[in-house]
Amino acid sequence: MTIVIKTQEDIEKMRIAGRLASEVLDYITPFVKPGVTTAELDRLCHEYMVNVQGTIPAPLNYCPPGYTPYPKAICTSVNQVICHGIPNDKALKNGDVVNLDITVIKDGYHGDTSRMFEVGTVASHASRLAQVTYECMWLGIDMVKPGARLGDIGAVIQRHAEKNGYSVVREFCGHGIGKKFHEEPQVLHYGKPGTGVELKAGMIFTIEPMINAGKKEIRAMPDGWTIVTKDRSLSAQWEHTVLVTETGYEILTQSAGTPARPALPQPAAVAA
């Protein structure tokens, strides 16, 4: 496994790409309401990326081995969709929850982030799932520092999710990122403290837990991309791109509209 340690020039470019990705989410927020289609959200984001930011939407035509090219500029995962939902002409309705996953390329570097959105008025159990998932992401981020291990991140996320009666998706994980969309290491959202790759300053990767209200099992849809919960329960996801610094971490995917850090439960953040 070759993990790219980023140079100061790389880091500066990644800060720009990360901020721009987050700003796409800021821009699209007012449009996420009942009656809008995910295809319309995709169109708006695509135009904003290309015409306003001068960025390239990384998902568009992205084609890893074994896949067909992804057909849209963003991923829109609604309700029981875990990840990689393809924007379509179905309108969002009151009570839906949707994850918008944005990755832009600026000057050859990738910025990758996602947020959960509530459409109109949603049920309390849906809001709670999104909130606990947000806490899971932040608890994982707080584990990041030189000398820590990837297992520390996964362990604290898994513990918080399961303590709240939820499950952690196993098949999809965070990843290294830079000039490539997906690099080493893989960042699992479950695991044991003290295991896995040791973190070093200059590493950049995403932390993006996918948490299900029901069981962890997944099902792939016939389009080759969309992943849903096998039991049709709700799923939630949040994502930030994180730099390991000399003393801790820096979140690269923040902007004016980024949701505030939550009040984190204690002592859940303490590694076992």
Image: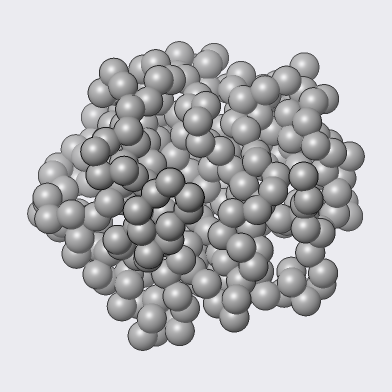
Which residue is more in the foreground, 100 or 176? Answer: 176
* Relative side of 75 to 63, left or right: left
Picture coordinates of residue 140, whole percent (x, y)? 65, 36
Which residue is more in the foreground, 186 or 234? Answer: 186
Picture coordinates of residue 190, whole percent (x, y)? 62, 25
Residue 74 in view of the camera: no
Q: Residue at x 54, y 42 (%)?
A: 208
Residue 115 sits above or below residue 121 on the image: below
Picture coordinates of residue 78, whole percent (x, y)? 27, 41
> How many numbered marks are there?
0
Picture coordinates of residue 112, whole percent (x, y)? 53, 58
Residue 95 in view of the camera: yes
Residue 124 sits above or below residue 65 on the image: above
Image-quadrant location for residue 54:
bottom left
Which residue is more in the foreground, 268 or 25? Answer: 25
Q: Residue at x 70, y 45 (%)?
A: 185
Image-quadrant location for residue 53:
bottom left
Image-quadrant location for residue 127:
top left
Q: Residue at x 19, y 64 (%)?
A: 40
Q: Quadrant of the N terminus?
A: top right
User: What colour scheme governs how the chains and residues are painted in the rendered image of this protein?
Assistant: one colour
